[in-house]
Image: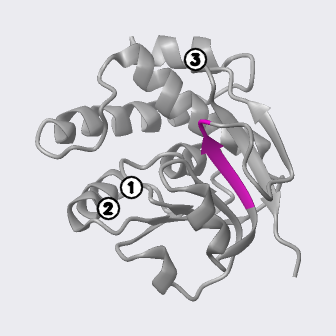
Amino acid sequence: MFRELLVREFAPYGSLTLSQIDALEAHYKLLTQWNARLNLTRIESIEDAVRLHYCESLFVGTKLPAGPLRIVDVGSGAGFPGIPIAILRPECSITLIESHQRKGVFLRETSRNLENVTVVTDRAENLKTEYDCLVSRAVSPKDLLKLKLANNLALLVGSEEIPGCDRSEPIPWGAGRYLVFHVKHP
């Protein structure tokens, strides 16, 4: 059911290869197993998981600039939006940042077969690496705007109005959800 729902929901925005669908389904299966022991997500229905976790994350991946990018996902938690972006955009290198050790263990396990993913278990403020783009959905935009990790930000938020952000567009899934973009100017 996961596969069919994912393909149907994401079809208006892009197509997925069989290997991408397999990888996304493998992540979903691990997520449901681990979520029983570790609070990774409160979303439990398969329909909501496909729409609000996977499709939203894939949507972000379609809106990022073309070509190989170095992307950092701050507050990755269960791997959203970073893992689906890594699966959709294998030419990009994705760094998942998660400060909680146990969630970091889950991220390492679930990204084991994704060569373009690195997991960092630390606070984003402690990193000195620069990236092409920062993505996030679980961290306050105000806090993300203070970070010096990337000049380009793509944030999944519950409000269209984020001070200092350049543009926003509604997310097709979930009422009141937006993808906001911000480019920091030196």
Q: How is the rendered protein coloured?
A: one colour
Residue placed under numbered mark 1 in the picture: 111
Q: Pick out the residue farthest to the bottom.
A: 128
Check disc 3 and give the amino acid type.
Answer: Val
Check disc 1 and give the amino acid type.
Answer: Ser
User: Which of marks 1 and 3 precedes in the sequence?
Assistant: 3
Examine the structure image and report whether residue 37 is included in the region drawn in magenta. no
Please tell me whether residue 134 is drawn above or below residue 151 in the rendered image.
above
Q: Which residues are magenta?
A: 153-158
Q: Residues within 10 Å of mark 3 (few under 14, many from 20)?
A: some
Return the x and y of residue 178 as percentages of the image width and height. 68, 35
Return the x and y of residue 161 as percentages of the image width and height. 74, 42
**Residue depicted at 69% across the width and 58% down the height:** 91
Residue placed under numbered mark 2 in the picture: 108
Q: Residue 172's quadrant in the figure?
A: top right
Q: Secondary structure at mark 3?
A: helix
